[in-house]
């Protein structure tokens, strides 16, 4: 319907008195604001379940009653992907059908409150899928990329860090050099611990597994800490002072060890030290802050404002590292970024392979519009991912660029997506556990956080 048609309808409805004068005036105003485009209504909500890169990526598709107007959103909780699907299909779908697709914050608040019990990872990811799809729809309607809807760029592209890893220190150094040769100015370095299952680097070197009172993967925090310090020393010696080094502890050490470790790495001038504490131990950041200048990054496991608000407001961390879909999507995360800006805390949104290309586009969109952007985690899109998600963000010289096409600028080849179902390319315990993670224990059998 064109603008004139809508005006006529509004006038006719008002005359027919099934619409009050006030409502008619309000609708006329809306019609003018959106240049006569009628408000799209949500007609269907679906979940695309695909794993083109091996990891399970649930992506929500919101379809409107306007021909060809739809959008995609990232709902990626890869370890429990099968649970996100019914959260969308059985709860959000009936809740949303018939609702306007152009009231994003209102819809977000409605979804968030509709379960009464909130801030869990499954529900937040489901909400994010819808939220990001609504932003995509609005961008397509406006014929603008989402970053333009948010005010436009404050920088040209997002400076990224790549993952350099290996079982041996020399391998990590080589891997870091190859990133630097490709133009990266930031590299995350992770090394294996001999005979153990370290995070981000697999088992250390060729060493046989250490003796333990169980048969599963072993990890001992003290061994890892000594090894990591040797790695940083080698990196500074081999790579120089110019490159920004990052490191992820992945909450694998006790807070007492975290405090000591954060002090010991100070000499290597890391760009940031990530997840040195687990979400359960965040009160310890006060102590870490008092004892060391090592910049702290935290938050990829956070679901709730109760987790990030105090850390930001007390300036206890330097980088907020939330997994955007885990926190409920673009809508809450742009508010989080705005809050952090006031406290000079910068963003470093979670961006590994368990974020869909739609989610990476949401990350880079926030990166280029938020003044307090810090750095973006990057993981490459393999060929299959790029075929399924046409229009992945583009990487050049360590910078990630958002699309210039409307919305996220990504079209999902749904037929091809179906050829890579959940479980595709999974092996070992991950396959047995339906995409979930197994367990890691200390030598004596105690479970560790991972
Ligand atoms: Co991490």
Image (cartoon, rainbow, N blue to C red):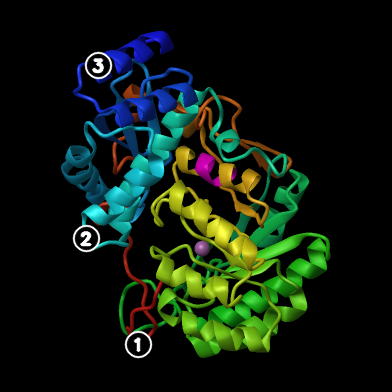
362 in the magenta segment = yes
Kindly identify the residue that appears in the image at 60 percent across and 85 percent down: 288
| Camera-side residue of 204 and 121 | 121
Kindly identify the residue that appears in the image at 39 percent across and 84 percent down: 443
Image position of 172 with respect to 263: above or below: above
Disc 2 residue: CB within 8 Å of ligand 1: no
Q: Which of marks 1 and 2 is in front?
A: 2
Asked whether disc 3 touches disc 1, contact meaning CB atoms under 8 Å apart, the reply is no
Q: Main secondary structure of the magenta part?
A: helix
Asked whether disc 2 touches disc 3, contact meaning CB atoms under 8 Å apart, the reply is no
Kindly identify the residue that appears in the image at 76 percent across and 45 percent down: 183
Residue 209 location in percent, x, y? Answer: 44, 74
| Camera-side residue of 392 and 406 | 406
Residue 334 location in percent, x, y? Answer: 52, 51
Give the distance between the C-alpha atoms of the residues marked 3 and 1, in whole angstroms.
80 Å
Which residue corresponds to mark 3? Answer: 15
The disc, 2 or 3, on the residue closer to the chain's N-terminal end is: 3
**Dot label at residue 444:** 1
Residue 428 location in percent, x, y? Answer: 31, 55
Highlighted range, magenta: 360-364
Residue 178 location in percent, x, y? Answer: 72, 49
């Amino acid at each position: 319907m064109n603008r004139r048609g809508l005006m006529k309808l509004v006038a006719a409805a008002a005359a027919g008195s099934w619409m009050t004068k006030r409502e008619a005036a309000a609708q006329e105003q809306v019609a003018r604001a959106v240049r006569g485009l009628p408000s799209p209504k949500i007609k269907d909500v679906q979940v695309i379940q695909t794993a083109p890169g091996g990891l399970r990526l649930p992506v929500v598709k919101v379809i409107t009653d306007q021909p060809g107007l739809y959008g995609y959103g990232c709902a990626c909780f890869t370890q429990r992907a099968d649970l996100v699907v019914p959260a969308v299909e059985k709860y959000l779908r009936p809740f949303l059908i018939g609702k306007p697709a152009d009231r994003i914050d209102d819809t977000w608040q409605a979804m968030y409150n509709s379960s009464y019990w909130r801030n869990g990872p499954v529900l937040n990811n489901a909400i994010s899928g819808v939220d990001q799809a609504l932003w995509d729809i609005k961008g397509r309607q406006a014929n603008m990329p989402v970053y333009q809807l948010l005010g436009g760029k404050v920088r040209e592209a997002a400076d990224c860090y790549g993952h350099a890893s290996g079982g041996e220190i020399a391998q990590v150094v080589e891997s870091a050099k190859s990133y630097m040769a490709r133009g990266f100015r930031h590299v995350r370095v992770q090394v294996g611990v001999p005979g153990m299952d370290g995070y981000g680097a697999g088992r250390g070197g060729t060493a046989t597994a250490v003796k333990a009172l169980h048969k599963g993967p072993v990890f001992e925090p003290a061994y890892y800490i000594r090894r990591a310090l040797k790695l940083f020393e080698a990196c500074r010696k081999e790579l120089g002072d110019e490159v920004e080094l990052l490191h992820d502890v992945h909450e694998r050490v006790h807070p007492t060890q975290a405090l000591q470790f954060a002090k010991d790495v100070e000499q290597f001038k890391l760009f940031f030290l990530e997840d040195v504490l687990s979400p359960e131990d965040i009160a310890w950041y006060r102590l870490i802050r008092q004892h060391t200048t090592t910049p702290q990054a935290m938050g990829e496991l956070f679901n709730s404002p109760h987790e990030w608000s105090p850390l930001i407001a007390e300036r206890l961390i330097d980088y907020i590292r939330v997994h955007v879909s885990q926190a409920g999507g673009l809508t809450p995360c742009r508010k989080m970024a705005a809050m952090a800006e006031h406290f000079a805390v910068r963003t470093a949104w979670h961006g590994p392979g368990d974020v869909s290309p739609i989610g990476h586009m949401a990350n880079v969109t926030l990166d280029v519009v938020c003044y307090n952007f810090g750095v973006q985690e990057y993981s490459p899109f393999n060929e299959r991912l790029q075929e399924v998600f046409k229009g992945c963000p583009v990487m050049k010289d360590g910078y990630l660029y958002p699309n210039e096409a409307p919305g996220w600028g990504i079209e999902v080849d749904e037929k091809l997506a179906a050829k890579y179902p959940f479980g595709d390319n999974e092996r070992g315990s991950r396959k047995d556990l339906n995409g979930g993670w197994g367990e890691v224990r200390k030598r004596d059998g105690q479970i560790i956080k991972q």
